Image (cartoon, helix red, strand yellow):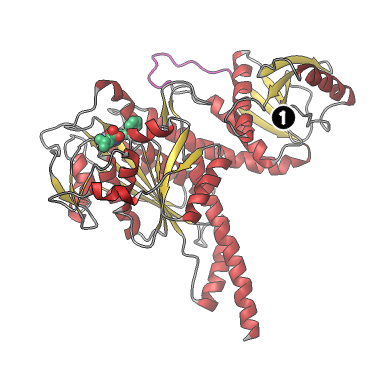
Amino acid sequence: MKTNIVNTASGKANVSALFFVKKSVQFSNVLSENAVTQVESVLNGMKDGPFEDLELLEIDGVSTIFVDAAKERGLSALDHLRMSAYRLAKRACKRQIPTVSIMLADAAPEQFKSILHGLHYADYKFDAYKSKQKDAFQVTFEIVAGEQVAEFKKIAEEVAVEHKAVVLAKNLINTCASDLTPAEFVDNANAIAKYTPGLSIKVRNMKQLEKEGFMGLVTVGKGSSHEPYMITLSYDGTKPARKGAAKVAAKSAKIADKNARTSADHLVLVGKGLTFDTGGLCLKPPKSMPEMISDMSGAATVLAAIQAIATLELPIKVSAVCCLAENAIGFKSVLPGDIFKAKNGKTVMVDNTDAEGRLVLSDGLAEAGEIGATHIIDIATLTGAMVRALGYAVAGFFCNDDDLGLKVINCGEACCEKFWSMPLEEEYADALKDKFADLKNTGSDAGAIAAALFLQEFVPENTAWAHWDIAGTAFVNKTWKYTEYGATGFGVQTLIELARRMSKADEESIENDAVVSEDEYKVC
Ligand code: BES
Ligand code: ZN
Ligand code: ZN
């Protein structure tokens, strides 16, 4: 797929595409008067009758695809646009239409962004394991943007970066577990850090983890022949060295001079990275096992997100911690009933070896605290209970901070990723207490809540924290929206958007602070 953003239609496209939101004509400024009349009569004729997703009609002598972006139940207006753009691209590819002209001169930036994302989704295929790889037909989309050309070009660059991150996460998640061991994941992360300016990486192996007391990862990972690792990726967009961040940093420095303080937000993303989860000695049933190649989705999501955040040079400090292990059966596997001491000093009895995600995440949360997180988001395919509660379309999240919780929901909405707030129900906390150890790794029947309450025991003090359980949304077994089968890339875009909005809030508060400080200075 190729996109050219142009002011007016070149007239060279084989087909024009018109997106109709709520069936109103929005394209009067890119269509001739005659065409507008024709379009209106077509739409009037279709008002009561069935309206196919894509109608191909002759308008003004040009083959025109009518894209109905106002259909499906449950999807937001922006998601309708994504869906319809996705379908349009699939159809154009199938029909081998070389160039499609999309009339978007009236579109709002977020509508344009959604359409672009939809086109990108249609481009994805994972055929690394097929004996023969087929070249997909290349469609060029000429996007007619009118006076918004410059603005749309900038958005297109951002969407390309975001979507590259989505593809990275999906490829990692779809790769089978024997080809993506913890060590292979580390190799990928090293390569990404090497080629992404501003991104640094620290890797701890089993020996170092043990020495430093990250015993959750050691306990889970020691049963496998593939040793566990922890990766910490760091990016500081508030440093003057970063081009895009220079303005903010200069402001920070100005304030620092006067008030001896700078913006202190440090967003740390923690990802569950089980490259495979057999369940350990509490073995999973065969039916639910193959999907466990996706149990490293959290780690892939945070790696992809920080790669994009650094590439976009967002003016904020962000780190990503990947907790990588394989939950396997071996002669060194953790035994049910074993007790270990976690990094924060709490002792944990392993009641069920299949509840391993929360154990490795205890180390990720500890690392987040050690590197000075002010805000933590942990992302994990954590519980089957979450799949049963919310299915594949909505991720449940738990949060100890209202402001962060609201941001998660709003950013998700902007990215067409749905989040539902779940309770950190204190009444179930006692069920996590163990007779010998401080805690055990299973709790009440409310499985997703029990897991979140367990994680809360390891959240550093005075830190805003949200836990996303993406067990249902990370991987689909049937076609869902713009994913045919496999990894969805869920969460990558919301994380990027969260960093973007947090950095803007920072920028604004610095600006406001600066004004206040200066006023105060004058008064004094
Ligand atoms: N990785 C699974 C959770 C999961 C289930 C992810 C389905 C994706 C799809 C997790 O490690 C797990 O097995 N959790 C157990 C915990 C239980 C033993 C307390 C579960 O939810 O069944
Ligand atoms: Zn498990
Ligand atoms: Zn798991």
- Main SS of the magenta part reads loop
List the residue tagged with mark 1.
22
Where residue 424 appears, x then y in whole percent? 37, 49
Q: What's the magenta region?
A: 127-138
Q: Residues within 10 Å of mark 1 (few under 14, many from 20)?
A: few
The residue lying furthest to the bottom in this view is 524
Q: Does 112 lie within the magenta span? A: no
Q: Does 133 lie within the magenta span? A: yes
Q: Is residue 256 above or below residue 284?
A: below
The residue lying furthest to the right in this view is 33
Residue at position x 72%, y 27% in the image: 20
Q: Which of 286 and 172 is in front in this view?
A: 286
Q: Nearer the viewer, residue 331 or 198?
A: 331
Where residue 206 appears, x then y in whole percent? 20, 46
Q: In this view, does 223 lie above or below 467?
A: above
Q: Is residue 181 visible?
A: no
Quadrant of residue 330 within the rendered picture: top left
Q: In this view, does 303 lie to the left or right of 27?
A: left
Q: Nearer the viewer, residue 369 or 250?
A: 369
The three-letter amino acid code for the residue at tag 1 is Lys
Quadrant of residue 335 within the rendered picture: top left
Q: In this view, does 288 lie to the left or right of 38?
A: left
Where residue 342 appears, x then y in whole percent? 21, 52
Q: In this view, does 362 lie to the left or right of 172?
A: left
Q: Is residue 321 left or right of residue 166?
A: left
- Ligand 1 has an atom within 8 Å of the beta carbon of the residue at disc 1: no
